Amino acid sequence: MILPMQSKFVIIINALVVLILLLTPHCALGCEIEKLSSKKRKKKCKKWEKKSEMPADCVELCKKSTKPEKPGLGNGEEECEGQNLSRKQCKKVGCCNWNRNKCNSAVGTDECKSVEPDPEEPEEPDPDEPEEPEPCENLKKKKNKCKKADCCKWKKKKCNSVVGTGVCKPTEPGEGSTHGGCIQIEKCTSCVKTPLKSISEIELLPEAGSSIRGMTVNGIQLVGASTEDTRWCWVATSITESLSDAVKVDPTKQSKVIKNLYEHKVVATLVVDGKKQELKGAFEDSNSVCDQIGIKEKSDASSQISEVLEHILHFIHIGERFTFPEWSIESVTSTDAWKAVKEAEEANVYDTSELGLGMKGDEKTRVILQEFHFWLVMADWNLLRDDEFKLGNNEWTRVNNLIDMKKILPKTFELYEKTTGKILSRPSDATLRSLGNLRKSGTLDECTMPTP
C-alpha cells in the first residue's frame, strides 16, 4: 500500500519527536520535577549536581529548589523582616541580624545571599549565641538561676513568670538593673554615710532574714547568721587596714571608691557553716550580693587567709569599677583593664581557662576581672611566694611582685599604679595570721573592733 505524502510526513515528524525524547530523558524529567514535592525535588537536583548530569532546562529550577524555602529569595528586607523568624532561623539566612528580639536586614534592600548550611550536616553550636530563655517553670528548684533569668521571679520557694503567658523578651547587655548578674547599677545616693570611713554596731537585720545580723564597714555591709563576734571583728579589721590612710594612698580616689561601695549597696556575706547564706529575695535583689566569705571547715591557715582577702578585694573592686574608667562596667572588652587581662594571658601569667565556667557575657567578664584584680594586689603585697603566707596558685604565675609586673606586664603595671595601687594598703602580718585562725580548726585570737 502506498501512503499519501501527508501521512508519510506525519510519521516522520512523530518518529523524530520520539527520538528526541529518548536522547534527552533528563529534560523531560526536568519538566516533571516541578510536580514533585519540594523535598523530593531538592533531592533529585542534588543527585544531578553530584553526577554532573544537570539538564540545561532544569538549572534555574534546581537553583530555586536548593535555596532555603523560608524565607524565599529576595532582598535583605524580604528575607529577614516580617517572616516571624526565630533567632536561629534569622542567623541562618546569611544577611540578617538578630537585634532586640527580632530579625532585621543587615544589607538593607540589597540582594541577600543565603549561607544556610547543608541540612545533611549537623550545625555547629555558636558558643557566643545567647540561648533562648528557659521557661520559668523549668527552674522551680533553682533559685539562683531563676533570679538571673529574664522574665522570672523567685517567690514562695518557686520560680514564677512575671509576664504570664506573654512573650519573654531577653534583656540586652547593659539594659538590666545589674551588671555581671549581681552588681547594682543604679546609685543609692541616700545610702552614703558621713563620715565615709565608719563602722556600725553588729545588729539584727530583719530585712535580710529572721536570724541575720549585719554591720557596715567603710561602705561594705557584712551580713550573716554567725554569732561569733570575734570573726566579724577580724574581717572588719582586714577591711579597715586595706582601706587605711597609708603614705602611697590617694585619699581623694580612695574616698570615691568607698562612696561607690555605699551607692551600689555592696554586701559581703559571712558564712560559717559552709552553706550559702539564705537571704530574703527582696534584700538580695536590691543589693550587690556577688560573693561570700567562707569560714573553712578543714584547711590550712594560708587557704583561710586567701579566702578572706580574696573576697574582701572582690567587694572593694565593685567600688573601683564605678570610680576608674579603666575598670568600667561599660564596653568592658574595650577597657584598659581588659587589655591588661589579655596581656597577662598572652604572657602565660594568668590562666582564665577555668574561670566563669557556664557563665556568659558580663557575668563571665566580671569573674575574670575580679580574679585578675586580686592577683595584682597579691603581687603588690608580696604574698604569693613569700616565706610565710604563700598565697599563690597555678592560676597566676611568674609575676610575684611589682618588679616582675613592670618587667613582664608593662601595661598591667601602668594600670595598677594609677588605679588600684592608689587606694589599697597591705594588712599587717598580725592581722593576716589572725585571719588564718578563723578556720574551724583554728584558735580564735582576741580582737578589738577597729575604729575608722
Image: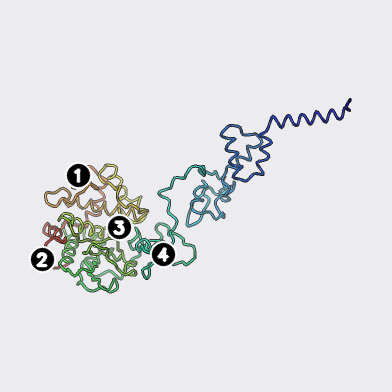
Between discs 1 and 2, the one toward the N terminus: 1
Distance Cα–Cα, label 3 vs label 4: 28 Å
Q: Is mark 1 on a helix, strand or loop?
A: helix
Residue mark closest to the camera, 4 vs 2:
4
**Mark 4 closeness class: few <14, some 14–19, many ≥20 residues within 10 Å:** many
* Nearer-N-terminus badge (3/2): 3
Instruction: Label 2, secondary structure: give it.
Output: loop
Q: Name the residue under label 4.
A: 152
Residue 1 placement (x, y as % from top left): 89, 25
Q: Residue furthest front?
A: 1
Residue underneath mark 3? 321
Residue ranking furthest to the top? 2
Mark 1 or mark 3, which is nearer the start of the sequence?
3
Q: Which residue is drawn at 21% across and 48% down?
A: 393
Could you tell me if the residues under marks 3 and 1 are in contact, i.e. CB atoms within 8 Å?
no
The residue at 10%/66% (across/down) is 446
Q: Quick check: marks 4 and 2 in contact, CB under 8 Å?
A: no
Of the residues shown, which amino acid type is indicated by label 3? Arg
